[in-house]
Amino acid sequence: MAVEQAQKGVAFQGGQDALDLARKPQTYWSMAFTSLRRDKLTIVALSFIAVIALLALGAGVITNAIGVSPTQTNPANQFQQPYLIPYLQWMLGTDPLTAPTMLYKSGGAPHWLGTDQLGRDQLARLLYGARISLSIALVAAGLSMALGVSVGAVAGYFGGRVDDVIMWFIATLTTIPEIYLLIIVNSIFRPTPLTLTLFLGFLGWFGTARFMRGNVFKVRMLEYTTAARAVGASNYRILLRHVIPNSLPIIVVITAVDVGALILTESILSFLGLGVQPPTPTWGNMLYRANDFVFLRDPVTKEFLGLHLLIWPGVLITLTVLSFYLIGDGLRDALDPMLKNKK
Amino acid sequence: MTRYIFRRLLQAIPTLIGVSILSFILVNAAPGDPVTMRTFGDTRMTEEARQILRRQLGLDQHPIVQYFVWMTGLSVQRGDQVAVMTRPGKPCGYVGGIGVTVCDGGGGILRGDLGVSLDTKQPVWDRIVERMAATLELGIVSLALSLLIGVPLGVLSAVKHGSLFDNLVRFFAVVFRAVPIFWMGLLLIFVFSVMLGWLPTGGRQTVSLTQTFNLGDRLRHLILPASVLAFGGIAGFSRIMRTETLEVLHTDYIRTAQAKGLSPGNVWFVHAFRNALIPLMTVMGPAVVGVLGGAVVVETIFAWPGMGRLTVNAAFQQDYPVVLGAGMFFAVLTIIGYTLSDIFYAVVDPRVRFD
């Protein structure tokens, strides 16, 4: 369109429009990037993930600066409530007692988000947990993307027997609900963070493979694939240079949503006690014992003691997963040129 | 139609075989050699005796033969081995034509024998049956809830396209997809059971000495777990119904219906709704899988005595036969769910049958 108009401009007016022609050409990806930049919701989601990732990376520095550690237990200081509000009250002069008392109990370290049943600092555990939860999800998503794309592309491109066998394999593994499959595997082989990542990756690529296969079926019939074959390109080259790039947008979208789904799955497994084992913190296994603490009240004041342990990990999981889903939706809108023309 | 159903049922067979192979591989991948486990600490066992036991259990045979034995309960040995192989409760016979001895050791997956629980020594099948009713009760109620709430929400949201209501429904559909189901369950327990004290925190009924059936009490116990399990379904169904209804509302026959002066209610609910329902059939299979998957978590939080909780507890105690048996059972349920959903689809949409 832009080129056409510019050409008309040259023909009828010359001058300014001729300069427009010299503009940098717009590629598919640069157009997608431009439309992504206008999508406020996606930008918010992306920024949230960036902040969480930075906090996770800087977990060591941050906790050292505060003077807390994710594994340091302190039985005398279990279930301390978040320090944040008493601190504000202290600074404002409305309550000069609570905050100093809390500091005294904790030995001088401020527990901004409180402590758990063993007196460990929740903020530190959340930060280190973010590291584990995010890296498990990201690596597993990468693994399942690589597997799904290659298996799906092979099934769709070659079709016939190869396709039958692959689809049979996928159908078999998807009849057992994924969470049960993971429970079975995790009960047989007790997972470490690394093996859990592998399990999640190796059992999570079926959806991607199905999408990929469907798309390859379409692309295989297009003229440019036939043209490539006519000039003598090998199957390998056609797959790698022509078929897979055509599916790249949808792969990017699926992977973004996948990361969110994997964070959820990991948290469910860890919550059930079948994922990453304590004392290594993940957002899921921080909620593992929350079940018991929902009922816990202070014998004197009748206040709920474990509420902060229930709220924060859940809020973080929800917001992070939500962000990845929103990024996926935003990418879908940005990367789908058909949809863009409709708007 | 009969032909379609028959063909669809035939398609389920390879998947079932696949599931059985997968389970067999997992059974054998589980740590612990059966012979060592049976004779652990028995000082009288010599290496020679172990070899004999290994042979009696058929562990010296090719994995494919072992798979066959595991499936059918029939064991096969080359040559006339009737004298060696026969034991009480294990009749054997020699088939002269192909030169093999066939013994019927009883059991086998095909006869519903899923093995014995390592924990309670009960047959796995009995333990599953014991828990099945509770899971079905929870699953069916929550599926019904999510359909009854999700479908109308989706249709209304499409009809009032772009309104505040539409945006709210879409917002909640996205958020509920991201909330971990166990966390939502814990929050609801905190609000409705601990703080307000309206509903019980868990279990299927109030524990009493007589354990008499009390419908009101049962329902009160069902409300929280069924709602938590239904949230995902409500979000999913409302999203699908919204998209489908929007699509149908733009078709020519709806415009015709509007043009000939039918009331909006008549157009939406008589003409649009029925056609928008068709794609819903295709997602019933995945919906069943979703409910079964969610049941693991919900049953654990609410101490619901169903199969999900059985599976998690068994996994915790590394009681593999139970975990695997439950997994296979769920796989069969899933295949039934998918097959039924395809058949219903063909019933409501005749075009499918001609593919």
Image (cartoon, rainbow, N blue to C red):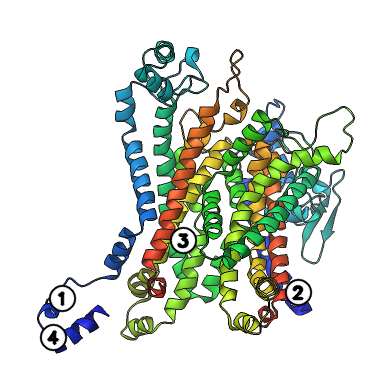
| Number of numbered discs overlaid on the protein picture | 4
Amino acid identity at mark 1: Asp
Residue ID for mark 3: A148
Do the residues under discs 1 and 4 have CB atoms within 8 angstroms?
no
Do the residues under discs 4 and 3 have CB atoms within 8 angstroms?
no
Residue ID for mark 2: B6
Disc 2 to disc 1, how far (Cα)?
A: 65 Å
To the question of a shared chain for discs 2 and 3, the answer is no
Q: Dot 2 lies on which element?
A: helix
Identity of the residue drawn at 48% across and 70% down: A213
To the question of a shared chain for discs 3 and 1, the answer is yes
Disc 1 to disc 4, how far (Cα)?
A: 12 Å
Mark toward the viewer: 2 or 4 = 4
Disc 2 to disc 4, how far (Cα)?
A: 71 Å
Question: How many neighbours does mark 4 have within 10 angstroms: few (below 14), some (14-19), or many (20 or more)?
Answer: few
Q: Dot 3 lies on which element?
A: helix
Between residue A8 and residue B233, name the one nearer to us.
A8
Q: Which mark is residue A13?
A: 4
Counting residues from the start of the chain, the first of labels 1 and 4 encountered is: 4
The image shows residue A44, relative to residue A79, as above or below, that is below
Taking the image as drawn, is residue A71 in sight?
Answer: no
